[in-house]
Image (cartoon, rainbow, N blue to C red):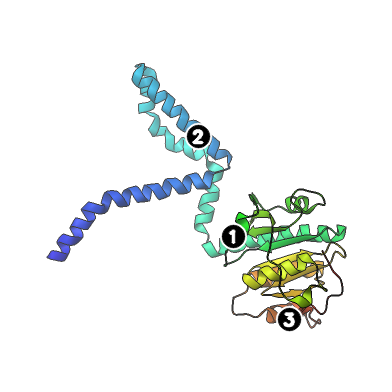
Amino acid sequence: MPWESIWLFIKTSYRPVIEIGILTILIYNVLYYLRGTRGASILAGIVILLIMMTFASEYLNLEVINWLLSNFWTVFAIALIVIFQPELRRAFAQIGSAPFAYHRTKRKEAIGEVVNSVINLSKRRIGAIIVFERQIGMASIVNDAVRLESKLNNYLLESIFYPNSPLHDGAVIIKEDRIVAAHAILPLCQDESLVLTLGTRHRAAIGITEETDAVVVVVSEETGIISIACRGRLKRNIEPDKLSRYLSSLLFSSEDRSLRNIFGSMAENEELAVFSNGKESKTSDE
């Protein structure tokens, strides 16, 4: 059969390419997973030691070292389990969990860290603007900001926005559970009616949500009021005890739900402070 011959030819011709591709992806993911961990340094040390011992045994004809290397692989698997036990446990836990559940857990942790920092910043009346990146990327803004790529932590967030710190001006951009960038300059809302009623932070929060699907948390420097912006709208006077619920509803909501429905379900018959023209605001918060 011609199809069987073609299939046999493809299998025999592309098998080395497939094997190399699988090994490349596997090695890359292992190294990427170990980056920044103690296991990365240990792995690098093992590789360097093996290279040095191999050269020594080959060129100096060291029989004992040569014998150790020839029998090394029999115990290497057990050594890997012992040395990399914490990393292996975390890796298998992530593989065993569904990708969606894993990302949802990371986003919940991020919300908790942001809520803690925002409440503290609000009490001290320290201005802040925090952007949750979602489906629409913000690469152009991130590239012009200060790249951090650090694990999200409420203490780190507070230190970034602390007055007179080098990065306190501009926004912090968060993706999943990591601070991607700080000192980010966001596009301002062009609605002229907002110029006299809102400050730069709030106009920037509305502006970025008009161009992307991001969710933005703003803390007023003058009043300490907490606000949330999403889809070109702004809700002010968020109570600290309800901030986590609002963020969870917005970040975990499906795209077809309207902002008013989300806020309405969370407000529990409260009058919504959602507006699109800024006429509710009487302060000029920077």
Tell me residue 180's x, y (percent).
63, 54
Q: Which mark is residue 140?
A: 1
- Name the secondary structure under disc 1: helix
Q: Which mark is residue 44?
A: 2
Q: Which mark is residue 57?
A: none
Q: Please name the residue shown 65% across and 54% down the image.
A: 145
Nearest to N terminus: mark 1 or mark 3: 1
State yes or no: discs 1 and 2 in contact (Cβ < 8 Å). Answer: no
* Residue of label 3: 264
Q: In the rendered image, which quarter is residue 102 located in? A: bottom right
Q: Is residue 246 visible?
A: no
Nearest to N terminus: mark 2 or mark 3: 2
Tell me residue 273's x, y (percent).
79, 78
- Name the secondary structure under disc 2: helix
The quarter in which the C terminus is drawn is bottom right
Q: In the rendered image, which quarter is residue 36 located in? A: top right
- Name the secondary structure under disc 3: helix
Looking at the image, residue 48 lies above or below residue 250: above
In this rendering, position of residue 61 left or right of residue 41 = left
**Depth check, front residue: 228 or 57:** 228
Looking at the image, residue 56 lies above or below residue 262: above
Q: Nearer the viewer, mark 1 or mark 3?
A: 1
